[in-house]
Image (spheres, helix red, strand yellow):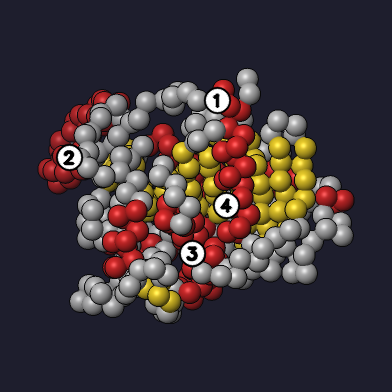
């Protein structure tokens, strides 16, 4: 089979989970459960068993541009968001790393971009099971995660987003994608993937700071590159802009899902102030909040589809958001670097980059899936410009 032959429907059915009613039902049962009614625990177990089995097959109709949450897709993309943290670049570009299996087996990496100067990393490739180009951005690996999270409290809206009056974003978030080696290499890799495989859809993902970069990348693809089939799914990303930017983003990228987990701190940052909605950061929709409910040893993870405001008070904003641990694991998948404190890179075959890096130590590894040949590129536009 050649890359051009590869146009086929997804091999799995879209599964929609709506568990609000189940949550209300459990709340009612738990309140009424007393020690003298222990048989209710058995009843809850039975209800949960059948409820989960049926709920994961339930299909919900959405009107207009409301995104459809796909549980199966979420468990696949979270593995890409995890793999991009790997520091063994040889294993990563050949997709043989310890996180490059399970639901992502068979992924073909087209380009791996490493910006050593800013401690950034991303890859672009083709997932045959998704019939899509997948772009993944790594989250922060600078300093300690505690210090990075503390720094999020003080991020200011200090940049007008190009081409959108009154839309404000944080310069650091914007610059990490637009003004580094990432943007030109990612866009070039998308073009190469389409030349090899045809006009595929694009899925952009990332965790934490990687989710912020994924958002700017997706908007760039939709607005500046004319891509019409771009889907965004991020995990534990911070807020990146004000309410006008959030509206602008959701208009151009309606098929966007932001997944948040329990008491994860990062989605609460930079802070959102209810009484100053136009002067503060605001999330774009649509959030899916993961949280656990249970009775005794019985625990069930709820995947709550939130409202279209981007700041649903009944979702992650309903809790304090004080956990780092909840930030580092989604769907049981670890989302962090193997070690903190440095921009650590491991290349088994160091000859791949010997004497072939730019002045800042940045480089990109390109792979041709038809020949499995890996090439190093140093013709990297530093990208120090605004979105066109």
What secondary structure is found at the residue carrying circle 4? helix
User: What is the C-alpha distance between the residues marked 2 and 4?
Assistant: 43 Å
Q: Nearer the viewer, mark 4 or mark 3?
A: 3
User: What is the C-alpha distance between the residues marked 4 and 1?
Assistant: 21 Å
**Residue indicated by mark 4:** 187
Would you say the residues marked 1 and 3 are in contact, meaning their CB atoms lie under 8 Å apart?
no
For label 3, the crowd category at 10 Å Cα-Cα, with few meaning under 14, some 14 to 19 and many 20 or more, is: few
User: What is the C-alpha distance between the residues marked 1 and 3?
Assistant: 32 Å
For label 2, the crowd category at 10 Å Cα-Cα, with few meaning under 14, some 14 to 19 and many 20 or more, is: few
Q: Which mark is residue 6?
A: 1
**Residue indicated by mark 3:** 388
First in sequence: mark 3 vs mark 2: 2
First in sequence: mark 1 vs mark 2: 1
Would you say the residues marked 2 and 4 are in contact, meaning their CB atoms lie under 8 Å apart?
no
- Which residue sits at x=83%, y=58%? 356
First in sequence: mark 4 vs mark 1: 1
User: What is the C-alpha distance between the residues marked 4 and 3?
Assistant: 13 Å
Give percent across and percent down for residue 227. Answer: 44, 47
- Label count reads 4
Give percent across and percent down for residue 107. Answer: 60, 34
- Nearer to the camera, 263 or 153: 153
Residue 11 shows in this picture: yes
Residue 246, by quadrant, is bottom left
In the image, residue 361 above or below residue 73: below
First in sequence: mark 1 vs mark 3: 1
**Residue indicated by mark 2:** 21
In the image, residue 313 above or below residue 136: below
User: What is the C-alpha distance between the residues marked 1 and 2?
Assistant: 40 Å
């Amino acid at each position: 089979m050649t890359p051009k032959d590869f146009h086929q429907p997804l091999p799995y059915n879209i599964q929609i989970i709506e568990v609000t009613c189940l949550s209300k039902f459990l709340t009612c049962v738990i309140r009424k459960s007393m020690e003298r009614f222990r048989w209710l625990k058995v009843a809850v177990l039975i209800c949960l068993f059948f409820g989960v089995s049926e709920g994961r097959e339930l299909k919900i109709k959405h009107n207009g541009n409301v995104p459809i949450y796909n549980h199966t897709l979420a468990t696949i993309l979270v593995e890409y968001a995890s793999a991009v943290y790997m520091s063994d670049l040889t294993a990563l570009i050949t997709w043989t790393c310890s996180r490059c299996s399970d639901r992502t087996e068979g992924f073909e990496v087209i380009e791996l971009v490493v910006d050593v100067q800013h401690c950034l990393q991303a890859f672009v490739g083709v997932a045959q099971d998704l019939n899509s180009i997948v772009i993944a951005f790594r989250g922060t690996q600078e300093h300690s995660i505690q210090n990075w999270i503390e720094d999020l409290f003080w991020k200011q809206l200090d940049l007008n987003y190009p081409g959108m009056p009154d839309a404000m974003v944080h310069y650091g978030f914007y610059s990490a994608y637009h003004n580094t080696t990432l943007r030109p290499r990612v866009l070039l890799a998308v073009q190469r993937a389409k030349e090899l495989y045809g006009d595929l859809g694009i899925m952009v993902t990332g965790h934490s700071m990687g989710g912020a970069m994924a958002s700017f990348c997706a908007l760039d693809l939709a607005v500046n590159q004319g891509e019409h089939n771009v889907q965004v799914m991020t995990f534990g990303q911070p807020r990146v802009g004000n309410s006008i930017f959030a509206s602008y983003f959701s208009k151009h990228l309606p098929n966007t899902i932001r997944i948040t987990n329990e008491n994860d701190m990062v989605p609460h940052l930079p802070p959102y102030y209810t009484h100053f909605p136009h002067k503060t950061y605001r999330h774009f929709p649509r959030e899916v909040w993961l949280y656990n409910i249970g009775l005794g040893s019985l625990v069930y993870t709820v995947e709550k589809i939130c409202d279209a405001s981007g700041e649903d008070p009944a979702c992650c904003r309903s809790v304090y958001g004080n956990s780092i641990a909840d930030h580092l694991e989604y769907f049981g998948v670890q989302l962090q670097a193997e070690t903190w404190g440095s921009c650590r890179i491991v290349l088994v075959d160091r000859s791949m980059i010997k004497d072939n890096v730019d002045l800042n130590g940045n480089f990109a590894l390109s792979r041709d899936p038809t020949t499995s040949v890996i090439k190093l590129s140093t013709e990297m536009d530093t990208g120090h410009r605004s979105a066109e």
